[in-house]
Image: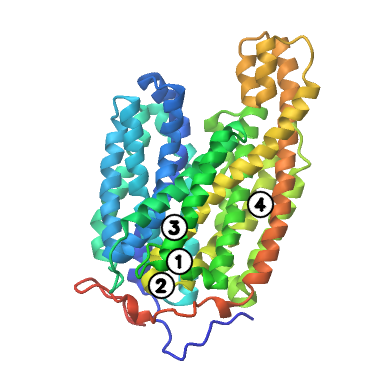
Amino acid sequence: METAPETGGPPAPRATRREWIGLAVLALPTTLLALDLGVLYLALPHLSADLDPSSTQQLWIMDIYAFMIAGFLITMGTLGDRIGRRRLLLIGAAAFGVASVLAAYSTSAEMLIVTRALLGIAGATLGPSTLALISNMFQDEKQRGMAIAIWMSCFMAGTAVGPVIGGALLEYFWWGSVFLLGVPVMVILLVAGPRLLPEYRDPEPGRLDLASVALSLAAILPVIYALKEVAAHGVSATALAAGAVGIASAVVFVARQRRLTTPLLDVGLFRSRSFSGALAVMLIGTATLGGVGLFVTQYLQMVDGLSPLAAGPWMLPSALGTVVGAMLAPAVAQRIGTGQVIAAGAALSAVGGLLLTQVGSGSGALPVIACFTLIFFGLGPMAALSTDLVVGAAPPEKAGSAASTSETSSELGVALGVALLGSVGTAVYRAEAADTLPAGLPAGAADAARESLAGASAAAVDLSESVAATLLGPAREAFTSGLNSVAGASAASMVVLIALAWGLLRSRAADTPAEAAPQGADAPVEGAPAPAAPGA
């Protein structure tokens, strides 16, 4: 049975009703962030008709939000440790609300790109702040595990309901309405936050090193860009150059952090086996979710023929599976061990991936979603427990920094999965399409179909019904073969995840870093609400 390390000190205070109500407040921006990541896909045709962006501008409208979140997570996590996590959360909430209004009423593509960038920077303050506050509010290990599971469940729920809510809004309102979802959420946070959330910050934070901020951006943004380029266009000189710049900047960044007295990111945290192991597990798990999710959503729309609005509800079971897996994980982990639970969940995900290799282009949505839900259910424990390990392995005054590394790992994992698994699926599609597309098709249509199923679908619009059928049938078969290959690769990645979880995360003995500060080091700020005493 897994046991917590013996510290010899008094037991950690247990959270009271106030902290649990505070968790509900923290769940609001978490759900909104997830919802905002996907809702724009449905709005893109509507805003394109209104703002008439170029193809390049469309890409920036879609991608700049995620770029800014990924790039600024480390900076914002550490900034919260320095100026106060509640303060940064409320500043970010106010900025997010203002930027949401500006985005909703954008009058040009350029204005929308800028406001989306501001939304991303503001969004980067929310995740690390909420997660760090949870670690401060829930010091009891069991309660913290459950609180983080709830936090993660809200994120997954937001991801699932985003297309449903977005589709309903677009049915009755203009495209800007999808951005206004954030305004009432942020108003609630700004009103309730000062009353329900305590303030915490590092009592000896040191100065913020701006050179490290620049290096962190130079490390993360080019790597994310390179992965997106590979996913969209395959390996190219541009992608390789961007990736090389990012990796070189990361090397310089780490070297600088080792020299600084108060670094932007304490790289010494990576000496904790559970900290580094949990980040590696998270990277692999989110890569699997990102890659498989990309192909499943395309299958529903382009193979099974569902509209984006109709496909949205089909994604709800997978989100529910993650929620159930995440919520069950903390209690089970207390009995049999964190690593064992993550490994068992990954084994279930591997089974789901293997079953997904057997679906065909005519199988329909139900078996695909059943397999997809099993994959998500199995990775639910990974999402909740690895996040808990990362935050719990850091000393309290570094909770924001640790939370930012957790979220950065997730962002990189999704981008990596879309790029690598997407490349596998695309390569299989193109190889099979080149062999199976019938002769006699119009040259332009055949070329488009050999590139992607989306190209085949677009080309089929201009063809007669019979010719379109001869084009789309083989293209859908080829895409399904690509999905099967991605599913097989995801099952193989689960074997690696199982080995990591079993080898690195079986014991909580390594969960506390060697030089962890005492619980009192991260004292509440003077004048702020203090954590409630046990039984209060």
Toward which corner of the image does residue 165 lie, by quadrant? top left
Q: Are marks 4 and 1 in contact (CB under 8 Å)?
A: no
* Residue type beneath disc 1: Ala
Q: Are marks 3 and 1 in contact (CB under 8 Å)?
A: no
Please give the name of the residue rendered at 30% of the width and 69% of the height, measured from the top-left corner.
205
**Label 2 residue SS:** loop
Q: Is residue 268 left or right of residue 115?
A: right
Which residue matches tag 2?
A: 138
Would residue 370 be visible to someone looking at this image?
yes
* Residue type beneath disc 4: Ile
Which residue matches tag 1?
A: 147
Q: Is residue 501 above or below residue 412?
A: below
Q: Are marks 3 and 4 in contact (CB under 8 Å)?
A: no
Q: Earlier in the sequence, mark 4 or mark 2?
A: 2
| Mark 1 neighbour class, 10 Å CA radius: few under 14, some 14 to 19, many 20 or more | many
Q: Earlier in the sequence, mark 4 or mark 1?
A: 1
